[in-house]
Image: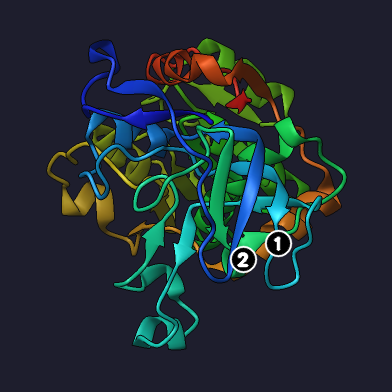
Amino acid sequence: MRAWQVARPGPMATRPLRQVELPVPEPGPGELLVRVRACGVCRTDLHVAEGDLPVHRPDVIPGHEIVGEVVTGADGFQPGERVGIAWLRHTDGTCRYCRRGRENLCPDSRYTGWDADGGYAEYATAPAAYAYRLPDSYPDEQVAPLLCAGIIGYRAFKLASLPQGGRLGIYGFGASAHLTAQLAIAQGAQVYVMTRSPAARRLGLDLGAAWAGGADEQPPVPLDSAILFAPVGTLVPPALRALDRGGTLAVAGIHLSDIPPLNYQDDLFQERILRSVTANTREDGREFLDLADLHHLTVTTTPYPLAAAEAALTDLAADRVNGAAVLLP
């Protein structure tokens, strides 16, 4: 099969990926073998390729927004069935976090495209217990970004604790943000978009945002909650200052550049909350996919052939992707 591996993590200009021919993988006990029909290109893939996230598996195949057709079934999944493979692929099920329903914090958690080979390939394997059944209302190209951009955005939205009908600020407006914004609007929120990309600002307004401005621009009204999707630590202080009293800022990314010193009085006082978001639970995934089916979100995608995976990541690094990039083998 054709596949891409992270051979030498580093900036995209150094060409950290290499295209290879590999045997079709063999599924282990309880695993599915899936023929990949689409794989979303996530910013986490970029962090793995560029070395922002430490190597967990040398020569790993990235990609964790996989839509595929089951070739070898397991645990109720049948050959020919469409299935989704996402970021979270293993937890121990016994630690205190798993027992509390917080498997996203499991110390023994493992991830697709980081600890195990992912979807920048023609075939992939995954534990059936961590695979998703997908809503029929989305074609392959559009359902792929829901599997990480959508699910992680949904968890960030929950942790941002937005009151009903409240004002939500969104910093950065890529794959995850444009889905989260629609979900928030569908539930009655007013959304304010802060991003450096003029095209992304236009997309935000087209999707129903009340206002869109520059990345570090102050919104015209105090925010009840905010989500930082851009991996830019310097945006944390202005995002906190944009919050109303008692507001919450959720940082959605797995990687963030350094946060400058915070001024307690200006940035955190009045019970403002700063919190991180770590992965997701499978329940988050199932809840979000049900909501996506209910509201039928507009998924803006930019398709690339599998052979252009390197170009897709390069475009993502340069903010040249509108919505979500998706590889189509």
Say what amino acid the circle numbered 2 marks. Ala
Mark 2 or mark 1, whichever is nearer to me: 1
Please tell me the numbered disc located at residue 128. Answer: 2
Observer able to see residue 42? yes
User: What's the residue at 44%, 39% (across, down)?
Assistant: 229
Residue at image coords 39%, 14%: 318
Q: Quadrant of the C terminus?
A: top right
Q: Is residue 102 above or below residue 235?
A: below
The reply to whether dot 2 and dot 1 touch (C-beta < 8 Å) is yes
Q: Secondary structure at mark 1?
A: loop
State the image coordinates of residue 133 (x, y, percent, origin top left).
74, 58
* Mark found first going from the N terminus, 2 or 1: 1
Task: Reply above or below: 119 against 147.
Answer: above
Q: Which mark is residue 73?
A: 1
Say what amino acid the circle numbered 1 marks: Gly
Asked whether the viewer can see residue 181, the reply is no
